[in-house]
Amino acid sequence: MPQIIFLPHEEICPDGAVIEAEPGVSICDAALKNGIEIEHACEKSCACTTCHVYVREGAGSLNESDEDEDDLLDKAWGLDPDSRLSCQAIVSDQDLVVEIPKYTINMVSENH
């Protein structure tokens, strides 16, 4: 079973984490199942950018991003070539190294 290595994030997983993920699940679902609370304001329906992550290693093993994901990623904070929406990035058979961005843009948050 592939592993997802989450790099340390100040709030979400300060020490980082290594989890096992079933092939065929999204990075977001694997993280949530293992207590890594990635924000997902649109309930993983590919309608926001709150679950944006950087896939630092293993990205070639993921499914290709589609046009909807690419359009949303253009609006994500800190977009870079390794960016994916974790709700859309499906784990295959390779290990991944994932970094959660320091910030996220939540257009529907009531705490702005």
Image (spheres, rainbow, N blue to C red):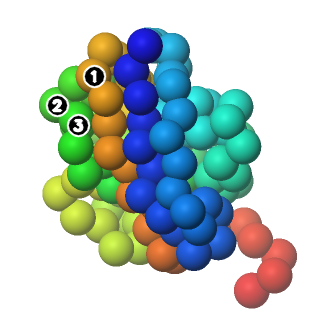
Task: Identify the element where label 3 is drawn.
Answer: helix
Q: Residue at x 34, y 74 (%)?
A: 78
Report the side of 97 relative to 50 (left or right): left
Q: Amino acid at mark 3?
A: Ala
Relative height, residue 48 to residue 106 (above, below): above
Q: Residues within 10 Å of mark 1 (few under 14, many from 20)?
A: some
Q: Residue at x 58, y 30 (%)?
A: 30
Q: Nearer the viewer, residue 58 or 17?
A: 17
Disc on res. 94:
1
- Asked whether disc 2 touches disc 1, contact meaning CB atoms under 8 Å apart, the reply is yes
Q: First in sequence: mark 2 or mark 1?
A: 2
Quarter in which the C terminus is drawn: bottom right
Q: Residues within 10 Å of mark 3 (few under 14, many from 20)?
A: many
Q: CA distance from mark 2 to mark 3?
A: 4 Å
**Residue 66 visible in rendering:** no
Q: Amino acid at mark 2?
A: Gly
Query: Which residue matches tag 2?
Result: 60
Task: Identify the element where label 1 is drawn.
Answer: loop
